[in-house]
Amino acid sequence: MDFDLVIKNGTVIDGTGRRRFHADLGLRGGKVAVVSASEPLSCTRTLDASRLAVAPGFIDFHSHSEWVAPLPDHDRVLAPLVLQGITTMVAGQCGFSPAPVTDETIPLVDHTSAMLRESAFPYRWRSVREFLDVLQSDGMMINTALLAGHAPVRYAVVGDSLEPPQPEQLEAMCRVLRKAIRDGAFGMSAGLGYTPGMFAQTEELLALLRVVAEEGAVYTVHNRTYRWATTFYEPMVGGVPHNIRAIREQLDLARRSSVRLQLSHLIFVGRNTWPTYQTALQEIDALADEGYDLAFDAFPYTYGNTTINVNLPKWYMADLKRNLDDPAELRRVEQEWDEQNALVGRDYSDIYLLWAGLPELADLDGLHFAAVAEQLNMRPAEAYVHVAKLSDGRARILQDTFSGDGSSEEPLQAVLSHPRCSFMLDTILTRGGKANPASYGTFPRLLGRYSRDLGLFTLEETVRRSTSYSAERLGLGDQIGRVAPGYWADLVLFDPDTVGDNTTLEQPDTPPSGIHTVLISGQVVAQGGQITTRARHGRVLRR
Ligand SMILES: [Zn+2]
């Protein structure tokens, strides 16, 4: 039998969770043609995988890189993903996606997503189908799947109004969403902690989720809050912790719509929120045990990147331009933050500025906001609002105390260990500023620190929840996420003894160890820590 390439003597971890086994793989036409555990395979081109694990390429369940994908040189920005073994990204998360758009909504979509996009690009598309067509004709470095964001769907009908849609407007939003899914989106994402998602009420979400459910697609959601107390809910203290209320809202929506629910980045923000993690996991399990289709995802760090405006209160965001110039409103925010931080259990030194995106602030990149304030000779809240304003909301930050910190990570380990947890990055890739360590280390860290060193889960289970489990939840089709005949040869060869991340907050952009070779569509794209080809072998995935 003729093969394009044979991978010899590898230890196959096939993505299903079953025990590893020794086999040769014969690749043909971009796919795995034969997995031979008994007979050695031969071919003029071979790759020796002795002492290496051969696994399906990793799936980043939660990506924001659809804002990098349309750039002509996206390869340079996305390279760290490939070098950690990622071959597929699921983009369009947290309520934002670059499609569908109309001539009228492009400025809105572009502005609210400006914090995610690496640099400006022309909108060479309107519909989801056209967006995917553009990516396909440009060529993609890695496989790309898209969700339709709630924000562009909402903008398409009500523009920048923050009022609930009228019944006929809601029907129109449902039509826009249905078309986006039929155009190839794998579902809808919502970002209820951001504008405009934070203004979406139950009726609006329920109507849209019924469309997602009817189409058999997936709903991913960034909850209204991840903190036990916020000004978002009343009463501010007492009663059910607010992050639990926010989870219950989503569980209730899943129950009422029967949608397949994915709670995005299940984190517990602030030291005083950590004790709520057991309740959260119990309530998720209870609904799943009733037969509802729900799960969640997480990254293996106690810190995550987001955008600077995320900490601005809802009332402040509702009239942002005016409030940013008003010293009285600044004092009000400052007071609110002081109360919040004390309640939640964190302070300004737990929030790092990764990238202000401005040459005049470049010296501040990488500092936490207590230090930023010192440098600017301002109070911390003042410095924070100052950077938010100057960067027009585009600055990237890294927040610590997500389910743990440097000294404790019990909630994080419980979340990662849960069998319903898919692994992902949730990173924002840009050329400028300090990187989020997740961009470089996520999957190696799961394989090294959490599986091999701490023994939280087996290597097979780590691979399963990095591959086939995510593919199945997303409905990526039956040819992604496993090492098996007929599946795409998206593969990562790694050394189980040495695989690991090397990132620190100070040196976030350090490459991982032990990732030997990465293949996409049967082609070697990275080897020995280097990208080995300029050709793009990624596939644009359509539902
Ligand atoms: Zn999010």
Image (tube, helix red, strand yellow):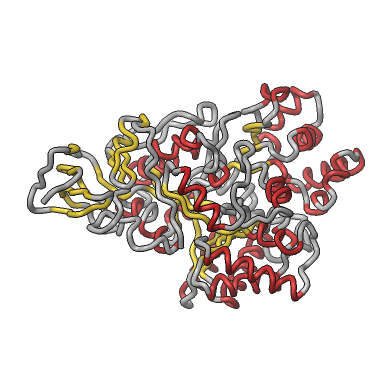
* Residue at (86, 40) in percent of width and height: 330
* Residue at (52, 48) in percent of width and height: 134
Q: Position of residue 259 (x, y in %)?
A: 54, 72
Q: Is residue 147 left or right of residue 166?
A: left
Q: Is residue 222 visible?
A: no
Q: Is residue 175 left or right of residue 373?
A: left
Q: Position of residue 528 (x, y in %)?
A: 31, 30
* Residue at (30, 58) in percent of width and height: 17
Q: Position of residue 291 (x, y in %)?
A: 46, 77
- Is 129 situated above or below 209? above
Marker count (numbered): 0
- Is 536 situated above or below 212? above
- Location of residue 514 (image quadrant): top left
Q: Is residue 204 visible?
A: yes
Q: Is residue 207 left or right of residue 145?
A: right
- From the viewer's side, name the closer residue of 535 and 96: 535
- Is 298 situated above or below 238? above
- From the viewer's side, name the closer residue of 153 and 116: 153
Q: Is residue 543 left or right of residue 268?
A: left
- From the viewer's side, name the closer residue of 405 and 177: 177
Q: Position of residue 131 (x, y in %)?
A: 55, 52
* Residue at (59, 41) in percent of width and height: 305
